[in-house]
Image (tube, rainbow, N blue to C red):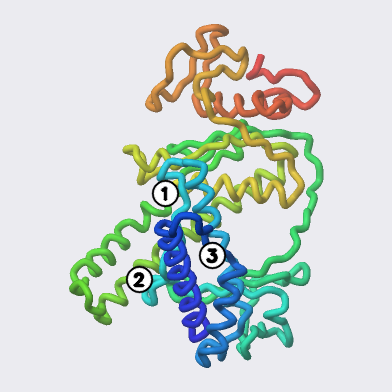
Amino acid sequence: MAEWDRCRWVWNECCAKSMQTYVWNMNRPEGVGKRTCGPAQLDKMLTGARKANGWLRQGSSVPQQQLIRDFGKSRAKAQKDIKDRLPMRQRAGMPKWKKKRETRPSLNYTRRGFGLRDGKLHLAGGIALSVVWSRDLPADPSSVRVYQDSIGHWYCSFVVPAEVQPLPQTGVVIGVDWGVRETATTTSDAHDLPHAQHGKNAAQRLARYQRMMARRRPARGKAGSKGYREAKRQTAKLHKKVARRRQDTGRKWAKQVVRDHDAIAVEDFRAKFLAKSTMARKAADAAISATKAALVEMGRKHGRDVRLVHPAHTTMDCAQCGARTKHALPLSERTYACTACGAISPGDKNSARVMLVRAGLNPASADRVRPDGAPSRRAA
């Protein structure tokens, strides 16, 4: 925590220097060039501050320099968005001050700033941590990030080279369509992902802790009581448990899909717009974005062919003849009936089959057709 206090001071000084440079450039005299506030100038500032301040010199320079690199990346991204005239909702905000009680610690160490010896993590500055390993490292790490989560637990995240672990070929393909009633509907009935409702199951306990926080909320400018801090910790703990359950459900389902199929056509769905609809709570509980990310990551890890399909008009097209309806179908209409060829099927299943067609995959082994090419009785 003492190391984080020094790094937080460095970040705030970078914010102050950046704001000072911006104000000077806005009011500079005519004929005078602009001043810059990049990582090179901030590095010089850090060197002078470490010479003049013994408290800052007690810490390692590795996380402090890395913090300056992160500040430079955030500032450059924000300036690029402003230069490109992106809408405000799409811009990355300028780096802000890191407050003591509102910002969680996060320290980054490059290869020369840490070491692994005798099962312990040794960080620059004489810090030795006893680590509880979740799994063995597949290769030598190039960097590590030590951070604290909302509950107060500390974690170490290592960066290692990615290794592809190929799986046996199956000769089967699958299409995935995302939804709210069911998180994922696929062309295979055995691989559909039902809505787990982890958030709904924990809603009653969550409401209880939030009422406790509301009753014990301190006045503005005053520290919270012990009861308020305990209620806040219980709320964060429950949020963390729900998030882990969603992640576990998504990863187990993704592993099963990747293991049984060679190629996967996935709807490139953006669930952000659902946050403004009447289905916001249920859509957030479904965790569509996290599940899609787990599926894409698992497919790349095991060398599978994952193809993202644009979601436009996937609910309006017919998977068999390719005809498109003349009007958008409401979400309440769960059955798709094609007026051109007369095909009738569940709407989500039809959309999942459209994913295969648009991805250019042969749906023979996934579309009610036997692998030898002969249609099944149901298809006939």
Label drawn at residue 285: 1
Which residue type carries mark 2? Gln
Q: Which residue is mark 3?
A: 37
In the depicted structure, whether residue 39 falls above or below residue 332: below
Give the CA distance from mark 3 to mark 1. 43 Å
Classify 10 Å Cα crowding around label 1: few (below 14), some (14-19), many (20 and above). Answer: many
Q: Residue at 76% across / 67% down in the picture? A: 138
Q: Residue at 81% across / 41% down in the picture? A: 169
In the depicted structure, whether residue 380 falls above or below residue 116: above
Give the CA distance from mark 2 to mark 3. 42 Å
In the depicted structure, whether residue 336 falls above or below residue 355: above
Picture quadrant where residue 40 is located: bottom right
Instruction: Report the quarter where the C terminus lies.
Output: top right
Which residue type carries mark 3? Cys
Q: Which residue is mark 2?
A: 234
Dot 2 or dot 1, earlier in sequence: 2
x, y percentage for residue 272? Answer: 44, 42
> Front-most of 7 and 236?
7
x, y percentage for residue 340? Answer: 54, 7
> Front-most of 134 and 375?
134
Which residue type carries mark 1? Asp
Q: Residue at 50% across / 80% down in the picture? A: 4
Give the secondary structure at mark 1. Answer: helix
Q: Residue at 41% across / 61% down in the picture? A: 23
Label drawn at residue 80: none
Give the CA distance from mark 2 to mark 1. 19 Å
x, y percentage for residue 306? Answer: 69, 40
